[in-house]
Image (tube, rainbow, N blue to C red):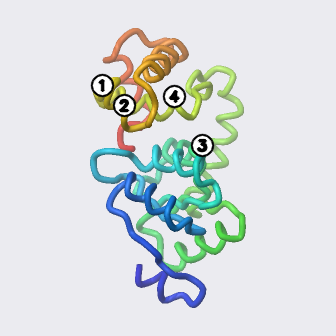
Amino acid sequence: MHLINFQEDMKVIATAADGREAYTLVAKYKPDILLLDLSMPPGESGLITTGRIKEDIPETKIIILTMYAEEEYLFNVLKSGASGYVLKKAPDEELIKAIRTVYEGGTYIDPTMATSLVREFVHHNIASETDPFQTLSKRELEVLPLAAKGYGNKEIAEMLFISVKTVEAHKSKIMEKLHLKNRPELVEYALKKKLLNF
């Protein structure tokens, strides 16, 4: 925080403890940039918060701060609408560079992850015809980890601000698209795709 306030052209206007508070503060202040931790306290995940903010307050650009240097995380974050992906272990100047790049309309990927993104993109283009994961909608991507973590339909509905019926519809679509028969298979799939840390 001090690092940002130390820059002549930057100022921290609010800080939030979790995803819901982040959403509320972004709606109130409409900052140019939101720095968001991918792993937050129990409740709404960084990925869900990103999706909600991009949908409702698209003018605020989001940079994800994370300790996860893995392709699956990066790909899911970009798919949810974030404009930047910075590792927590990155040097201070890296974060400042990311904020400036995203503010100017660019996308910033941690340099150590850039080759992963290219590899993932190539793999995605080759695999998109065969990998059913690529057919999931943004909302289905939000429901999947919550269902795998064991949240009930009512809890998921409250977290995502949708009806229980809609949750049920998304769940059956997910099972159908991914060719899964039951919840243990869903949990196994979510683990394999590294979706349970969000």
Quarter of the image for the C terminus: give it.
Answer: top left
Tell which tag, 1 or 4, sits nearer the viewer: 1
Q: Is residue 191 at all visible to an observer of this figure?
A: no
Seen at 61% across and 57% down, the residue is: 83
Whole-number angstrom distance, CA of label 2 to CA of label 1: 6 Å
- Total residue callouts: 4
Please provide percent x and percent y for residue 41: 28, 52
Mark 3 and mark 4 residues within 8 Å of each other at the beta carbon: no
Alpha-carbon span between mark 1 and mark 4: 15 Å
Q: Is residue 195 visible?
A: yes
Of residue 26 and residue 100, the one placed in the foreground of this image is 26
Residue 152 is labelled as: 1
Picture coordinates of residue 17, whole percent (x, y): 32, 61
Name the amino acid, label 3: Lys
Quarter of the image containing the N terminus? bottom left
Please name the amino acid that badge 4 sits on: Glu
Point out which mark residue 140 bears.
4
Q: Kindly check if marks 2 and 1 are in contact, taking CB atoms under 8 A apart as contact.
A: yes
- The answer to whether 178 is drawn above or below residue 88 in the figure is above
Disc 3 from disc 4: Cα separation: 12 Å
Mark 3 element type: helix
Mark 3 is surrounded, within 10 Å at the Cα level, by few (under 14), some (14 to 19) or many (20 or more) other residues, namely some
